[in-house]
Image (cartoon, rainbow, N blue to C red):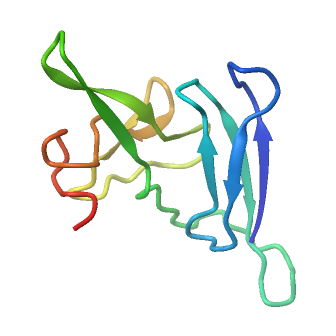
Amino acid sequence: MVYTYTLESPESGDQVLVKFFNDPTNTIHVISLNQTTHIGMDVQFLDENGEAIDVCGALLSFASLNSGAVYDDESESYILNSDEYVTNFDGDYIAINGSSVSYNASKNRAHTATSNESLEQGSRFEQNE
């Protein structure tokens, strides 16, 4: 796999702190310091000979999109303070039964609209269980 990342729109200038992983299931961790940051990601799949694999018609999963929340004293509820999402993908979104990830057709965006960190914050599961 070859991942190509492009910093598209950070609020803090032309730099952002990231950590890259060798594990293709982890890929990248972005430290945005509570600022909106858009990262473009292009993925190329390669076979054992290093040749590109045509993924037209492939099934890809967005199952690891996370959202976090903080408690807001004024509203006495949790509000989202981080939101990972996938947008501008060319394909058909197929919902996974029980997943917190949903698709917003007007924004062409797959994300989770509620925190999926803890039961207290609205998740169906505890993050560390």
Res. 58 image quadrant? bottom right
Q: Would you say residue 89 is visible in this rendering?
A: no
Which residue is more in the foreground, 14 or 90?
Answer: 14
Quadrant location, the C terminus: bottom left
- Vertical placement of 86 versus 49: above or below? above
State how many labels appear.
0
x and y percentages locating residue 76 in the rendered image: 12, 18
Q: Would you say residue 79 is visible in this rendering?
A: yes
Which residue is more in the foreground, 80 or 111?
Answer: 80
Residue lying farthest top?
74
Q: Residue at x 71, y 41 (%)?
A: 17
- Vertical placement of 95 versus 73: above or below? below
Left or right of residue 37, residue 98 in this image = left
x and y percentages locating residue 63 in the rendered image: 41, 58
Q: Residue at x 32, y 52 (%)?
A: 95
Which residue is more in the foreground, 51 or 43?
Answer: 43
x and y percentages locating residue 38 in the rendered image: 65, 32
- Vertical placement of 88 versus 127: above or below? above
Q: Residue at x 23, y 58 (%)?
A: 97
Residue lying farthest right?
50
Quadrant location, the N terminus: bottom right
Q: Residue at x 38, y 40 (%)?
A: 67
x and y percentages locating residue 56 in the rendered image: 66, 63
Residue lying farthest bottom?
48
